[in-house]
Image: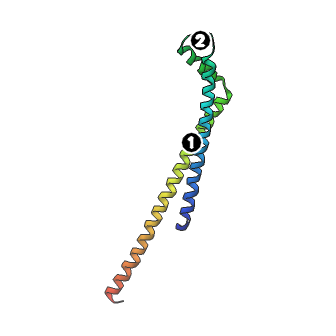
Amino acid sequence: MKISQYPAAIVQAAQVVNELDSQIAAVSQHIARLEGNADRTAAFEQGLKNEDQRRGRRFELLCVSQEYQTAQNTMTRLMSEKASAIAHLEYLRNQFSVAKLELRMAIAQQLAGAEFRDLVGV
């Protein structure tokens, strides 16, 4: 990749991370809503006598909810994709830094070579 292409690639990789963050926030809100519904259902069941029974009932409700399980799986997948996207973004940033250093080194070597030729009189 040419050094001039790195900034655009870095921006694109950052946008992927931001999009994944947005999707994670949406799934997180959905999971919170499902958990809130389970809490509400457990809170108003007449047969439950204490908080431990309500927590147990909440757990049962969430375990049998296919929508909740799907949301949890989606969250896991998105978190994994985000970790990969961040790693790719850091890789591009590091490559860009190395490319800039190599360019600086080449310029310094050219200048040093020119100065040496001037000193020798070539």
Pick the residue in front: 45 or 100: 45
Relative to 119, residue 42 above or below: above
The residue drawn where x is 36% and y is 85% is 117
> Which quarter of the rendered picture does the C terminus lie within?
bottom left
Circle 2 sits in a helix, a strand or a loop, which is it?
loop
74 left or right of 121? right
Depth check: 62 or 80 in front?
62
Q: In this image, 68 relative to 50: left or right?
A: right
Query: Foreground mark, 1 or 2?
Result: 2
Q: Residues within 10 Å of mark 2 (few under 14, many from 20)?
A: some
Chain-order first, disc 1 or disc 2: 2
Name the image quarter holding the N terminus. bottom right
Residue found farthest to the bottom: 121
Residue 22 lies left or right of residue 106; in this view the side is right
| Above or below, comparing residue 54 to residue 109 in the picture | above
- In this figure, which residue is indicated by the disc labeled 2? 48
- Location of residue 120 in the rendering, given as x and y in whole percent from the top left corner: 32, 87
Q: Which residue is the site of mark 1?
A: 80
Q: CA distance from mark 1 to mark 2?
A: 38 Å
Amino acid type assigned to the residue bearing label 2 in the image: Leu
Could you tell me which secondary element the residue under label 1 belongs to? helix
